[in-house]
Image (cartoon, rainbow, N blue to C red):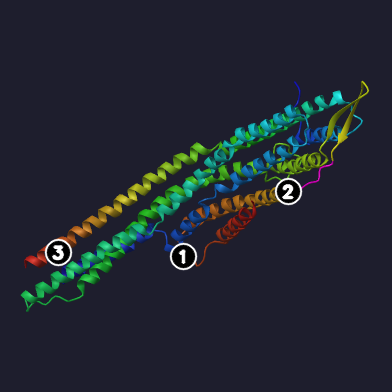
Amino acid sequence: MKQVRLFLSAFILSYVLSGCATLTKSQLNEVNAFGQLTCNFSAFPGTIVSTYNHIHQQQEIYRANSLADPAAHFAAIKQANDFLRITKPYPQKIDLSLKIIDEYAQGLILLTDTKHRKLFDTAAIKFGTNLEHLVTTYNKIDASAQLPSGIGSAVAAVIMLGGDVYIRSKQAEDIKQVVPLGDVIIEKMTNNLLEFLGAKDDPQNTKSLQYLISQEKESVENNYRAYLGLNRDVVSINKDKDNYPGFIKHERFASIADDRDCLQMLQDLDGIEVLRVQCIDAVTGLRKAHAKLLKDIQEKITLKQYAQEIQDYSAQVKNIYATIGAIK
Amino acid sequence: MPTTPTLAQVNDAMAAVNAALQDMNVPENFEDALNELSNTLQGVQDAIIEQTEQALINTLAADNAELQALNQKIKDLCNDLDQTTATIKNVSTTVGTIASIIGALV
């Protein structure tokens, strides 16, 4: 029994000592929650560009259809095709940059995963059952030196506790090493993202996404109006050896489907503008949440709830999901 | 060196060409030129959009390598954590198995 007590004491001592290096479960959970929210973040800015490019190509078709000359008409369709071919890889390129942030988030999830502890728990339970069996067998042989029954499960519980603390201590060490490094890079990358999204509200900046979207609305209107008005067809009437050249002006009667197309383009442009603004909020939220995460893991505290910054970030990400769902 | 026109300027020019194409007073021999001008303006518009998007993408990619290096470090740490867990589990299982064997032998 003395040895068992020593064994238990050693585990309790290791728990107390290693406790200094661990993060509380709530802190690990907060890191995990941040990772979960940030995963799949990459799809958002890429969606803005892919939707924009699709609308641009679609409205080019309306312009092509307003040109009566066959050669010019086909050249316009070819241009629409060239535009889509050239810009097709762009959303993937945007996603590639953002996927690196996703990968970082997934890394944080893996580092704070409870799977390691669960695996260990299973082994400890088996160990406890075998030890219990050994004690029972021993007691049958030597009735005078009865060992206390239930010691197996008690030892297993201590092993689980010790194992849990050890793994958490290792996780804490890793997180404390990674998150400060990540914070410096996240700051740079979120700044790049905000520049990409045009966070500084400047409608006159001709190199911004905001400007592209606003001008596309003008372009849709121009080309749909050209499509509705169509153009002139050349006519040539010969009578009594005389030739009478002239024009016939078409007024196109647009179908409901055409109008729906135009409406959809305008709605999608509105949708990606909303998405752009929401992405700015979410990227700003991501930056704040990561900075708060860094602050929280540097202190030994038990968090009663996730930091307000993470809750705000969560709400911003949910808004984005709703907007993406509304874009065709 | 000529400056690149803005999308607003191209849109204004395109609106003027579209209006001219619908004007009955524009002579026939002008129509070909207007068609060609319309397509040229479209080409300019497409090129401006492509260049702007490419520039924005380059801005985004500026710090990719740094975070990629950190991600590799995280992967290594995760592998270490997996190995540590496996080692503890193996020790626990081995001790449990020995206890079981001794129990059976006694």
Asked which quadrant contains residue A202, the reply is top right
- Element under label 3? helix
- Chain identifier of the residue bearing label 2 in the image: A
Look at label 2 and name its amino acid. Leu
Asked which quadrant contains residue A13, the reply is bottom left
Does A252 appear in magenta? yes
Which residue occupies 18% across, 67% down? A130
B41 vs A187, nearest the viewer? B41
Give the alpha-carbon distance from disc 2 to disc 1, as whole Å.
Answer: 49 Å
Look at label 1 and name its amino acid. Thr
Mark number, residue B52: none
**Disc 1: which residue:** A302
**Rendered view: A30 above or below A68:** below
Which of discs 3 and 2 lies nearer the camera? The answer is: 2
Residue A301, horizontal then vertical, whole percent: 46, 63
**Disc 3: which residue:** B99
Which residue occupies 20% across, 72% down? A151
